[in-house]
Amino acid sequence: MSNATQRAALIAAADGVTVGDFTVHAYDRRPATMKPGDAWVRWRGAERADGFAFINTWAVIVIVSGEEQVADDMADQLAYALAGALEPVMFIDAITPVAQATSAGDMNAIQIMGKSE
């Protein structure tokens, strides 16, 4: 599968995941202005697998909230809903909280890291 095709599959899997009144809106690149619910896919490199194939590493980043406690509470629920949506198209290695840097300051986010062919 090409990287473009895999990226599209990850975007389609994440887009529309809903927990309560929080809905993920996935894009192919980071939005210029981010708000809670915005998500995007990043290619994080490739490693040689058996034979001549490469295994790609991907990150799906989702902005959750500006308030730390709200972000933690949302991440608890959202991370596993997103993992369930992404597992058919990517083997998930880790789910971690991250601070997404912006020109206005850091925003709370979760990052789901995984691998695909």
Image (cartoon, rainbow, N blue to C red):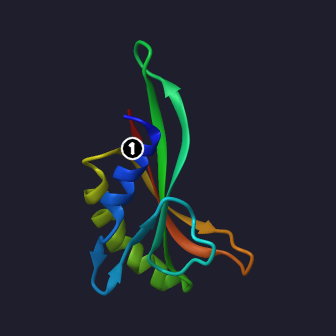
Which residue position holds label 1? 5
Which residue is more in the foreground, 28 or 73?
A: 28
Question: In the image, 55: left or right of 86?
Answer: right
Check the picture and name the quadrant holding the C terminus.
top left
Q: Residue at x 28, y 50 (%)?
A: 87
- Residue at 49% over, 52% down: 59
59 w.r.t. 54: above or below: below
Quarter of the image for residue 4 reads top left
Q: Residue at x 37, y 34 (%)?
A: 1
Residue occupying the far right of the picture: 103
Quarter of the image holding residue 77? bottom left
Q: Position of residue 72 (x, y in %)?
A: 45, 76
Q: Residue at x 34, y 71 (%)?
A: 78
Is residue 42 or residue 78 the one in the foreground?
A: 42
In this rendering, the count of numbered labels is: 1
> Which residue type carries mark 1?
Thr
* Direction top: furthest residue: 51
84 left or right of 106 in image: left
* Camera-nearest residue between 61 and 1: 1
Q: Secondary structure at mark 1?
A: helix
Residue 24 position, x and y percent, is: 38, 73
The answer to whether 70 is drawn above or below residue 107 in the figure is below
Give how far across and how far down residue 60 sits, in percent.
46, 57
Label 1 CA crowd tier, 10 Å (few <14, some 14–19, many 20+): few
Q: In the figure, 12 relative to 106: above or below?
A: above
State the residue in front, 1 or 60: 1
The x, y position of residue 16, in whole percent, is 31, 71
Q: Is residue 66 left or right of residue 105?
A: left
